Amino acid sequence: MGLFSKAKDNYDKRRDIAEFNYKAQEYVQAGNMAYEDAYAELVIACDSVQGKIHEFVSYKQKVLTEINQTLKKVDSEHKELKLSLQINFPSWESSGVTVQPWEKLTAFDKIIDTWTAPSLRDFVTDVSPSEYYEAKSAMNRAKTYRDVMKAKKQELKNARSAVKEIPYFMSDEKSKIESLMVKFRKTVEMLKTSSDSQKIENLKDISQLIADSLTTQFLDNNYQVTSQYQSIHNRMGELNQSLEQLDWLRG
Protein backbone atom coordinates (compact mmCIF):
# COMPACT_ATOMS: atom_id res chain seq x y z
CA MET A 1 0.00 0.00 0.00
CA GLY A 2 1.46 3.36 -1.04
CA LEU A 3 1.90 6.27 1.40
CA PHE A 4 -0.97 8.20 -0.13
CA SER A 5 -3.32 5.21 -0.06
CA LYS A 6 -2.43 4.50 3.56
CA ALA A 7 -2.92 8.13 4.52
CA LYS A 8 -6.30 8.20 2.83
CA ASP A 9 -7.31 4.99 4.59
CA ASN A 10 -6.33 6.47 7.98
CA TYR A 11 -8.22 9.65 7.25
CA ASP A 12 -11.32 7.77 6.11
CA LYS A 13 -11.30 5.66 9.25
CA ARG A 14 -10.99 8.70 11.50
CA ARG A 15 -13.82 10.33 9.62
CA ASP A 16 -15.89 7.18 10.14
CA ILE A 17 -15.05 7.14 13.85
CA ALA A 18 -16.18 10.75 14.16
CA GLU A 19 -19.40 9.85 12.37
CA PHE A 20 -19.92 6.84 14.64
CA ASN A 21 -19.46 9.06 17.70
CA TYR A 22 -21.83 11.68 16.32
CA LYS A 23 -24.56 9.13 15.62
CA ALA A 24 -24.04 7.53 19.01
CA GLN A 25 -24.66 10.85 20.72
CA GLU A 26 -27.77 11.41 18.62
CA TYR A 27 -29.14 7.97 19.52
CA VAL A 28 -28.58 8.48 23.23
CA GLN A 29 -30.12 11.94 23.21
CA ALA A 30 -33.13 10.70 21.24
CA GLY A 31 -33.61 7.81 23.66
CA ASN A 32 -33.36 10.01 26.73
CA MET A 33 -35.73 12.60 25.31
CA ALA A 34 -38.35 10.02 24.34
CA TYR A 35 -38.32 8.47 27.78
CA GLU A 36 -38.20 11.69 29.80
CA ASP A 37 -41.08 13.33 27.91
CA ALA A 38 -43.32 10.27 28.28
CA TYR A 39 -42.45 9.91 31.96
CA ALA A 40 -43.23 13.58 32.66
CA GLU A 41 -46.63 13.19 30.98
CA LEU A 42 -47.38 10.12 33.09
CA VAL A 43 -46.47 11.97 36.30
CA ILE A 44 -48.88 14.78 35.41
CA ALA A 45 -51.66 12.29 34.70
CA CYS A 46 -51.02 10.47 37.98
CA ASP A 47 -51.06 13.70 39.97
CA SER A 48 -54.45 14.61 38.52
CA VAL A 49 -55.97 11.22 39.38
CA GLN A 50 -54.36 10.41 42.71
CA GLY A 51 -56.67 12.66 44.72
CA LYS A 52 -59.73 11.22 42.99
CA ILE A 53 -58.68 7.70 43.92
CA HIS A 54 -58.28 8.64 47.56
CA GLU A 55 -61.70 10.30 47.51
CA PHE A 56 -63.19 7.16 46.00
CA VAL A 57 -61.65 4.93 48.64
CA SER A 58 -62.82 7.32 51.36
CA TYR A 59 -66.33 7.13 49.91
CA LYS A 60 -66.31 3.33 50.05
CA GLN A 61 -64.94 3.37 53.58
CA LYS A 62 -67.88 5.57 54.63
CA VAL A 63 -70.29 3.20 52.89
CA LEU A 64 -68.79 0.24 54.69
CA THR A 65 -68.96 2.11 58.00
CA GLU A 66 -72.67 2.67 57.36
CA ILE A 67 -73.08 -1.02 56.57
CA ASN A 68 -71.31 -2.11 59.75
CA GLN A 69 -73.28 0.30 61.91
CA THR A 70 -76.58 -0.69 60.29
CA LEU A 71 -76.00 -4.41 60.67
CA LYS A 72 -74.89 -3.96 64.26
CA LYS A 73 -78.12 -2.09 64.96
CA VAL A 74 -80.17 -4.82 63.25
CA ASP A 75 -78.41 -7.44 65.35
CA SER A 76 -79.17 -5.55 68.53
CA GLU A 77 -82.85 -5.49 67.56
CA HIS A 78 -82.92 -9.08 66.26
CA LYS A 79 -80.24 -10.92 68.18
CA GLU A 80 -80.90 -14.15 66.32
CA LEU A 81 -79.83 -12.71 62.96
CA LYS A 82 -76.06 -12.39 63.56
CA LEU A 83 -75.49 -10.10 60.60
CA SER A 84 -72.64 -7.86 61.74
CA LEU A 85 -69.82 -7.70 59.22
CA GLN A 86 -66.94 -5.95 60.91
CA ILE A 87 -64.39 -5.60 58.14
CA ASN A 88 -61.00 -4.22 59.05
CA PHE A 89 -59.90 -2.84 55.72
CA PRO A 90 -56.37 -1.65 54.95
CA SER A 91 -55.59 1.83 53.72
CA TRP A 92 -55.24 2.08 49.99
CA GLU A 93 -51.72 2.40 48.64
CA SER A 94 -51.17 3.73 45.17
CA SER A 95 -49.62 1.52 42.52
CA GLY A 96 -46.93 2.86 40.24
CA VAL A 97 -45.35 1.99 36.95
CA THR A 98 -42.31 -0.14 37.61
CA VAL A 99 -39.54 1.76 35.87
CA GLN A 100 -36.27 -0.07 35.68
CA PRO A 101 -33.19 2.18 36.02
CA TRP A 102 -31.23 2.38 32.84
CA GLU A 103 -27.49 2.36 33.26
CA LYS A 104 -25.48 4.79 31.22
CA LEU A 105 -23.51 3.22 28.42
CA THR A 106 -19.85 3.19 29.38
CA ALA A 107 -18.92 4.48 25.95
CA PHE A 108 -20.47 7.86 26.77
CA ASP A 109 -18.68 8.83 29.96
CA LYS A 110 -17.63 12.00 28.23
CA ILE A 111 -18.64 13.82 25.06
CA ILE A 112 -16.42 13.22 22.08
CA ASP A 113 -16.01 15.89 19.44
CA THR A 114 -18.03 14.99 16.39
CA TRP A 115 -15.59 16.51 13.96
CA THR A 116 -11.87 16.93 14.07
CA ALA A 117 -10.11 19.05 11.49
CA PRO A 118 -7.71 17.05 9.35
CA SER A 119 -4.11 17.18 10.51
CA LEU A 120 -0.85 15.58 9.50
CA ARG A 121 -1.36 13.02 12.28
CA ASP A 122 -4.52 11.80 10.56
CA PHE A 123 -2.47 10.88 7.53
CA VAL A 124 0.58 9.29 9.10
CA THR A 125 -0.74 7.67 12.32
CA ASP A 126 -2.38 4.33 11.83
CA VAL A 127 -5.89 3.82 13.21
CA SER A 128 -5.93 0.65 15.28
CA PRO A 129 -8.68 -1.87 14.43
CA SER A 130 -9.80 -1.86 18.07
CA GLU A 131 -10.32 1.92 18.05
CA TYR A 132 -12.39 1.73 14.89
CA TYR A 133 -14.55 -1.22 15.92
CA GLU A 134 -15.06 0.09 19.45
CA ALA A 135 -16.49 3.32 18.04
CA LYS A 136 -18.73 1.35 15.69
CA SER A 137 -19.79 -0.98 18.51
CA ALA A 138 -20.57 2.01 20.74
CA MET A 139 -22.76 3.45 18.01
CA ASN A 140 -24.67 0.18 17.68
CA ARG A 141 -25.15 -0.02 21.46
CA ALA A 142 -26.44 3.52 21.45
CA LYS A 143 -28.91 2.65 18.70
CA THR A 144 -30.14 -0.32 20.73
CA TYR A 145 -30.46 1.98 23.74
CA ARG A 146 -32.57 4.40 21.72
CA ASP A 147 -34.85 1.62 20.50
CA VAL A 148 -35.28 0.24 24.03
CA MET A 149 -36.13 3.68 25.38
CA LYS A 150 -38.66 4.21 22.60
CA ALA A 151 -40.29 0.93 23.59
CA LYS A 152 -40.33 2.10 27.21
CA LYS A 153 -41.87 5.35 26.01
CA GLN A 154 -44.77 3.39 24.53
CA GLU A 155 -45.20 1.53 27.82
CA LEU A 156 -45.40 4.83 29.66
CA LYS A 157 -47.88 6.20 27.13
CA ASN A 158 -50.03 3.10 27.60
CA ALA A 159 -49.84 3.61 31.35
CA ARG A 160 -50.91 7.25 30.96
CA SER A 161 -53.90 6.16 28.88
CA ALA A 162 -54.82 3.66 31.59
CA VAL A 163 -54.54 6.36 34.26
CA LYS A 164 -56.94 8.59 32.34
CA GLU A 165 -59.50 5.76 32.29
CA ILE A 166 -59.46 5.31 36.07
CA PRO A 167 -61.92 8.16 36.90
CA TYR A 168 -64.47 6.73 34.44
CA PHE A 169 -64.11 3.30 36.00
CA MET A 170 -64.56 4.71 39.51
CA SER A 171 -67.58 6.74 38.45
CA ASP A 172 -69.23 3.63 37.02
CA GLU A 173 -68.49 1.68 40.18
CA LYS A 174 -69.80 4.45 42.42
CA SER A 175 -73.09 4.31 40.54
CA LYS A 176 -73.22 0.56 41.10
CA ILE A 177 -72.52 0.97 44.82
CA GLU A 178 -75.13 3.70 45.23
CA SER A 179 -77.69 1.47 43.55
CA LEU A 180 -76.72 -1.43 45.82
CA MET A 181 -77.00 0.78 48.89
CA VAL A 182 -80.52 1.85 47.93
CA LYS A 183 -81.43 -1.82 47.86
CA PHE A 184 -79.49 -2.45 51.07
CA ARG A 185 -81.39 0.24 53.00
CA LYS A 186 -84.73 -0.88 51.65
CA THR A 187 -83.97 -4.50 52.56
CA VAL A 188 -83.09 -3.47 56.11
CA GLU A 189 -86.38 -1.60 56.41
CA MET A 190 -88.30 -4.69 55.31
CA LEU A 191 -86.36 -7.18 57.40
CA LYS A 192 -88.46 -8.50 60.26
CA THR A 193 -87.30 -11.91 61.46
CA SER A 194 -84.74 -14.61 60.83
CA SER A 195 -87.27 -16.29 58.54
CA ASP A 196 -86.46 -13.63 55.94
CA SER A 197 -83.55 -15.74 54.77
CA GLN A 198 -83.47 -14.24 51.25
CA LYS A 199 -83.28 -10.71 52.64
CA ILE A 200 -80.51 -11.73 55.02
CA GLU A 201 -78.50 -13.25 52.17
CA ASN A 202 -79.01 -10.12 50.09
CA LEU A 203 -77.65 -7.94 52.89
CA LYS A 204 -74.64 -10.20 53.29
CA ASP A 205 -73.96 -10.28 49.56
CA ILE A 206 -74.02 -6.50 49.26
CA SER A 207 -71.92 -6.04 52.38
CA GLN A 208 -69.28 -8.57 51.43
CA LEU A 209 -68.97 -7.33 47.86
CA ILE A 210 -68.30 -3.75 48.92
CA ALA A 211 -65.92 -4.96 51.64
CA ASP A 212 -64.08 -7.09 49.07
CA SER A 213 -63.61 -4.04 46.86
CA LEU A 214 -61.64 -2.40 49.67
CA THR A 215 -59.44 -5.38 50.42
CA THR A 216 -58.57 -6.32 46.84
CA GLN A 217 -55.67 -4.78 44.93
CA PHE A 218 -57.10 -2.12 42.65
CA LEU A 219 -54.31 -1.36 40.18
CA ASP A 220 -51.31 -3.24 38.87
CA ASN A 221 -47.93 -1.74 38.08
CA ASN A 222 -49.17 -0.47 34.72
CA TYR A 223 -52.18 1.30 36.24
CA GLN A 224 -54.50 -1.32 34.81
CA VAL A 225 -57.39 -2.52 36.97
CA THR A 226 -56.42 -5.96 38.24
CA SER A 227 -58.42 -8.95 37.05
CA GLN A 228 -59.40 -9.71 40.65
CA TYR A 229 -60.82 -6.24 41.12
CA GLN A 230 -62.49 -6.27 37.71
CA SER A 231 -64.28 -9.44 38.79
CA ILE A 232 -65.66 -7.68 41.88
CA HIS A 233 -66.71 -4.73 39.75
CA ASN A 234 -68.57 -7.03 37.37
CA ARG A 235 -70.25 -8.87 40.23
CA MET A 236 -71.59 -5.55 41.52
CA GLY A 237 -73.39 -5.05 38.24
CA GLU A 238 -74.67 -8.63 38.23
CA LEU A 239 -75.92 -8.35 41.81
CA ASN A 240 -77.73 -5.12 41.01
CA GLN A 241 -79.46 -6.78 38.08
CA SER A 242 -80.49 -9.86 40.05
CA LEU A 243 -81.86 -7.77 42.95
CA GLU A 244 -83.88 -5.66 40.55
CA GLN A 245 -85.83 -8.79 39.65
CA LEU A 246 -87.15 -9.19 43.21
CA ASP A 247 -90.75 -8.06 43.52
CA TRP A 248 -90.39 -6.77 47.05
CA LEU A 249 -87.49 -4.52 46.04
CA ARG A 250 -89.24 -3.17 42.94
CA GLY A 251 -92.33 -2.07 44.83
Image: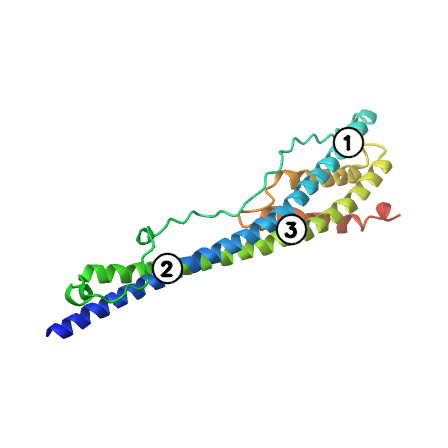
Instruction: Report the front residue among 26 and 79.
Output: 26
**Residue 73 at x, y = what percent?**
80, 28
Residue 167, compared with residue 89, is above or below; it is below
Q: Amino acid at mark 3?
A: Ile
The label shown at residue 71 is 1
Could you tell me how far apart the alpha carbons at marks 2 and 1 are, in whole angstroms? 67 Å
The label shown at residue 216 is none
Question: In the rendered view, how is the structure colored?
Answer: rainbow
* Crowd band around label 3 with a 10 angstrom C-alpha radius: few (<14), some (14–19), many (20+): some
- For label 3, the residue is 166
Residue at screen point 52% across, 55% down:
37
* Crowd band around label 2 with a 10 angstrom C-alpha radius: few (<14), some (14–19), many (20+): many
The label shown at residue 25 is 2
Residue 204, compared with residue 101, is above or below; it is above
Could you tell me how far apart the alpha carbons at marks 3 and 2 are, in whole angstroms? 38 Å
Answer with mark 3 or mark 2, whichever residue precedes in sequence.
2
Residue 101, compared with residue 144, is above or below; it is above
Residue at screen point 61% across, 44% down:
218
Q: Amino acid at mark 2?
A: Gln
Question: Closer to the observer: label 1 or label 3?
Answer: 3
Residue at screen point 84% across, 46% down:
249
Could you tell me how far apart the alpha carbons at marks 1 and 3 are, in whole angstroms? 31 Å
